[in-house]
Image (tube, grey):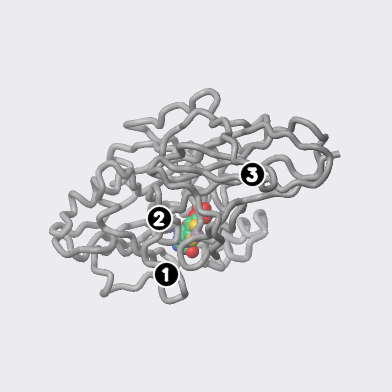
């Protein structure tokens, strides 16, 4: 980690942050090599997207995966220097190194991650194949004591999140200490070397990047970063749908409307569309990948010439249908139906 190497990095990537932070993190990433997986994610089934009609693909590339963090300069931690302390209300406090994590059974899971700041119709949502260790298993080894309420996670840059202990310890939740993303070590901006991912919860309460400390504690004892800033303590991802196509002008007649719907860890049951104040009509759903991933849909609507507003709404597997009532993103996620205006000529 000589300063000369860091300066070269700054020149190549054009980031002063690299120069400020020093360690050659890309070299550390490159040295990691392929992961040996104990369990691969099921292959994405055929027909899981309507990308030809304009929906996203199920897997978002690492380049296109949305990025949100408070850090002005992205933390640059080398895997070989990384340690995770697990402590607080546990019987067996522990400290894990990167090699400790790699030596455990590595699982791969296809998971959709969403940001609470995503406005209706927004794109702060992506899906990746995450590789890592099962967090519930690690916490079971640590031995959670009675009375514990939150898993308080701290990033190298001081960001903190509080995740309900009953959620992260659920055996079938699939919470992870993730080290890989779409076949490679986590990109630096997505939390290298290790981050948390909890299916079904917004990132700000669960997806701590550049993770260095996990404290099992009560809600009273520790206050996560966003809580005093007007955001909620507990924040499951709200059921949503979005129209991805068409945009702008279309030819009058039969028009394909297509988009995305998500209800992470619950699953999507149905999507409906309507034109103007017309009846809701069912959309065709793409093949489901799992309840933890977004689901693509399409529908054909009849558009006479003129300007139309097209809206969509999703129903999840709990039977809940998205409310049309509009709520802002704070404190726990926007609500409302996404709609677009198209002109048919
Ligand atoms: N260290 C750190 N981790 C963080 C955040 C942050 O600001 N700092 N933001 C969280 C939020 S709000 C979201 S939505 C997700 C986004 O993860 P991504 O950038 O990989 O998409 O990271 C979470 N983890
Ligand atoms: Mo977020």
Q: How far apart, in angstroms, are the residues tagged by discs 1 and 2?
A: 23 Å
Residue drawn at the location 46% of the way across and 32% of the way down = 289
Residue drawn at the location 24% of the way across and 63% of the way down = 149
Residue 267 shows in this picture = yes
Residue toward you, 172 or 180: 172
226 shown above or below 312: below
265 shown above or below 207: above
Q: Is residue 176 left or right of residue 31?
A: left
| Residue 136 x/y as whole percent | 26, 48
| Contact flag, marks 1 and 2 (Cβ < 8 Å) | no
Residue toward you, 25 or 313: 313
Q: Is residue 150 left or right of residue 48?
A: left
Residue wearing tag 3 = 243
Q: Is residue 41 left or right of residue 135?
A: right
Q: Residue furthest top?
A: 46
Crowdedness near tag 3: few (<14), some (14–19) or many (≥20) residues, C-alpha within 10 Å: many
Q: Nearer the viewer, mark 2 or mark 3?
A: 3
Q: Nearer the viewer, mark 1 or mark 2?
A: 2
| Residue 312 x/y as whole percent | 60, 45
Residue toward you, 205 or 208: 205
Mark sitting on residue 236: 2
Say which quarter of the image contains residue 220. bottom left
Q: How far apart, in angstroms, are the residues tagged by discs 2 and 3?
A: 22 Å
Count of numbered circles in the view: 3
| Residue 14 x/y as whole percent | 67, 59
Q: Quadrant of the C terminus?
A: top right
Residue wearing tag 1 = 158
| Contact flag, marks 3 and 1 (Cβ < 8 Å) | no
């Amino acid at each position: 980690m000589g300063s000369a190497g860091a300066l070269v990095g700054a020149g190549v990537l054009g980031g002063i942050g690299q120069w400020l932070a020093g360690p050659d993190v890309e070299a550390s990433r490159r040295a990691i090599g392929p992961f040996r997986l104990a369990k691969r994610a099921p292959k994405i089934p055929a027909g899981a997207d309507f990308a030809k009609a304009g929906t996203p693909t199920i897997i978002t590339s690492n380049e296109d995966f949305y990025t949100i963090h408070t850090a002005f300069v992205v933390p640059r931690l080398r895997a070989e220097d990384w340690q995770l302390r697990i402590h607080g209300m546990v019987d067996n406090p522990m400290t894990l190194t990167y090699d400790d994590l790699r030596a455990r059974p590595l699982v791969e899971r296809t998971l959709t991650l969403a940001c609470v700041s995503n406005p209706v119709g927004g794109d702060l949502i992506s899906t990746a194949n995450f590789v890592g260790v099962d967090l519930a298993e690690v916490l079971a080894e640590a031995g959670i004591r009675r009375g514990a309420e939150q898993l308080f996670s701290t990033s190298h840059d001081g960001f903190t999140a509080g995740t309900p202990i009953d959620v992260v310890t659920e055996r079938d939740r699939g919470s992870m200490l993730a080290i890989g993303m779409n076949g490679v070590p986590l990109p630096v901006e997505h939390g290298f070397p290790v981050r948390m991912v909890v299916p079904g919860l917004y990132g700000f309460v669960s997806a701590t990047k550049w993770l260095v400390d996990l404290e099992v504690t009560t809600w009273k004892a520790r206050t996560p970063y966003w809580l005093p800033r007007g955001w909620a303590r507990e924040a499951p991802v709200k059921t949503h749908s979005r129209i991805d196509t068409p945009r702008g002008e279309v030819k009058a007649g039969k028009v394909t409307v297509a988009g995305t719907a998500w209800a992470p860890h619950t699953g999507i049951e149905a999507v409906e569309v309507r034109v103007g104040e017309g009846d809701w009509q069912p959309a065709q759903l793409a093949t489901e990948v799992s309840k933890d991933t977004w689901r693509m849909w399409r529908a054909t609507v009849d558009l006479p010439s003129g300007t139309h507003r097209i809206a969509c709404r999703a129903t999840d597997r709990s039977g809940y249908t998205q409310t049309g009532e509009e709520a802002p993103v704070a404190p726990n996620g926007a609500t409302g139906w996404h709609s677009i205006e198209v002109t048919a000529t």
